[in-house]
Image (cartoon, grey):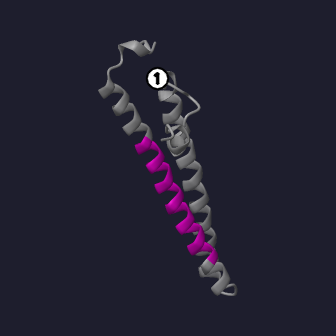
Amino acid sequence: MPAPFHAFEIRDWLAMDRTLMANERTLLSYLRTSLGLLAAGATLLKLFPDRPPEVITGCVTAALGLAIAVVGVHRFRKVRARYRPFLRDPDFHVWQVGDRMPSA
């Protein structure tokens, strides 16, 4: 069972924020790798449509890119679900920081 919110100190909240931001960075790394593999596979398929070894390599590369994207999203959701009970606002995402800033 998670600790009550008032038991957390500021360093605990900051550690939680760092962990969530690291999780999002990791997801972006998975997606960047996936996109690169998909692009390489599509390039091979487009440049060498009549050469079977390159077509097979392109298909395998594109399939690997899709698999890496699925694994990355799965891991992101798994870590996010593990930390959800500790979040102050479970629907908050790091990219919404600008929306929550007080206006001057």
Asked whether residue 36 is drawn in magenta, I would say yes
Residue 6 location (% of width, % of height): 39, 13
For badge 1, the amino acid type reads Phe
The residue positioned 57% from the left and 46% from the top of the image is: 73
Asked whether residue 90 is drawn in magenta, I would say no
Q: Main secondary structure of the magenta part?
A: helix
For this rendering, which residue is in front, 4 or 66?
A: 4
Residue 75 location (% of width, % of height): 51, 42
The residue positioned 59% from the left and 32% from the top of the image is: 91
Residue 36 location (% of width, % of height): 53, 68
Determine whether, in the image, residue 15 is placed left or right of residue 81.
left
Determine which quarter of the picture holds residue 5.
Answer: top left
| Residue 89 in the image: above or below residue 49 | above
Residue 95 location (% of width, % of height): 52, 46
Determine whether, in the image, residue 57 is placed left or right of residue 94.
right
Dot 1 lies on which element? helix
Q: Which residue corresponds to mark 1? A: 86
Q: Which residues are magenta?
A: 21-42
Farthest-out residue, left:
11
Determine which quarter of the picture holds residue 96.
Answer: top right
| Residue 86 in the image: above or below residue 35 | above
The residue positioned 51% from the left and 40% from the top of the image is: 103
Farthest-out residue, front:
104
For this rendering, which residue is in front, 28 or 71?
A: 28
